[in-house]
Image (cartoon, rainbow, N blue to C red):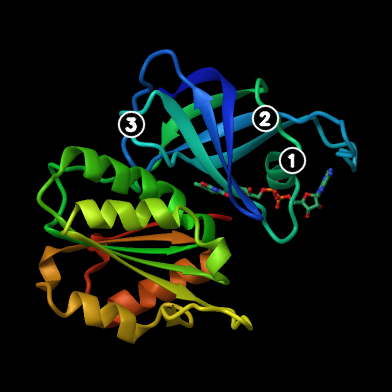
Amino acid sequence: MANSYELELNEIIKLSPTARALRYNTKDLINFKPGQFFMVEFFLKKENGFDIKENKSEKQRRAFSISSSPNSQYIELTVKKTPNPFVSDYLISYTKKGERAIFTGPYGHFIFDSQLTKKNLIFLAAGSGIAPLMSILRYIDETKPQVNIHLIYSNKTENEILWKEEIENISKRNKNILFTFTLTQNEENTLWTGKRGRINKNMISEIISNWKQDEIDCYICGPLEFTREMEEILKMEGIPNSNIKYEIYE
Ligand SMILES: Cc1cc2nc3c(=O)[nH]c(=O)nc-3n(C[C@H](O)[C@H](O)[C@H](O)COP(=O)(O)OP(=O)(O)OC[C@H]3O[C@@H](n4cnc5c(N)ncnc54)[C@H](O)[C@@H]3O)c2cc1C
């Protein structure tokens, strides 16, 4: 049975113009596996210009992946404002330290388990889809299981790459953790020299061609269209269904 925890928002970190990390204090460690999510009930306040329309309730429940490691003294959410936002607008622009939310869970099978994992892992993420993968990366950084990881992370622009510096630092500390950032929107006056364009078959096969097909686990997280596209590519590359895990943010 799922547990419920009432937690207080203790820290808000700006990750990009449209994304924040929200850290909620926990007295004791809350049990979850890296990659899981909670259903979170927020109590939205009509203040400072935030209005609740269409007679909707101030209580709103949404699913959020946990981006912190299970060993952290807080539960962290990585929230990105959606194109047509409601709760995500509140969480980015109006929520304040001290506000409480009720977390029910944990839920989900999009998990890393050091006993069951394959030797090689490919992580494919778009936008806020990095959230559960941050939990997994942080956990792997702490516990050092014998796995090779390559993360391919797609965003529109460079300033929307969430946790960029931390991903770079984790990779510096762990020679077995590599990453590729790719940008889908052309910006003027940019010094970006990395990859451009959506994650495609070539980017993926370059990485997995060095690995035996039955020794690869694939983790995909992002919007529905993205997860479907990535799944198709992985199948074309001969990865069996049972080795593909995905979390869809709809
Ligand atoms: C398993 C899972 C894990 C997830 N993890 C994450 C995560 O880690 N990070 C993340 O960013 N997202 C995550 N999501 C997505 C998240 O749960 C929400 O769906 C997302 O934040 C969008 O919620 P929203 O309320 O902003 O938008 P919606 O639920 O789409 O609501 C928008 C609609 O609300 C109405 N509306 C707009 N403003 C108002 C208003 N002021 N008053 C009343 N109605 C209004 C409009 O009609 C608009 O169309 C996850 C989803 C799933 C399923």
**Ligand 1: does it lie within 8 Å of the C-beta at label 1?**
yes
Quadrant of res 28 = top left
For image coordinates 38% across by 50% down, the residue present is 166
Which residue is the site of mark 3? Answer: 70
Q: Nearer the viewer, mark 2 or mark 3?
A: 3
Give residue 46's position: percent from left, percent from top. Answer: 86, 31
Q: Which residue is mark 1?
A: 90
Q: Circle 2 is placed at which residue position?
A: 42
Quick check: marks 2 and 1 in contact, CB under 8 Å? yes
Disc 1 packing (10 Å; few <14; some 14–19; many ≥20): some
* Amino acid, disc 2: Phe
Q: Amino acid at mark 1?
A: Tyr
The reply to whether discs 3 and 1 touch (Cβ–Cβ < 8 Å) is: no
13 vs 85, left or right, is left
Whole-percent x and y of residue 213? 14, 72
Q: Position of residue 95 (x, y in %)?
A: 71, 33
Secondary structure under the numbered disc 2 in the rendered image: strand
Foreground: 21 or 207?
Answer: 21
Tell me how far mark 2 sits from mark 3, CA to CA: 22 Å
Q: Is residue 237 visible?
A: no
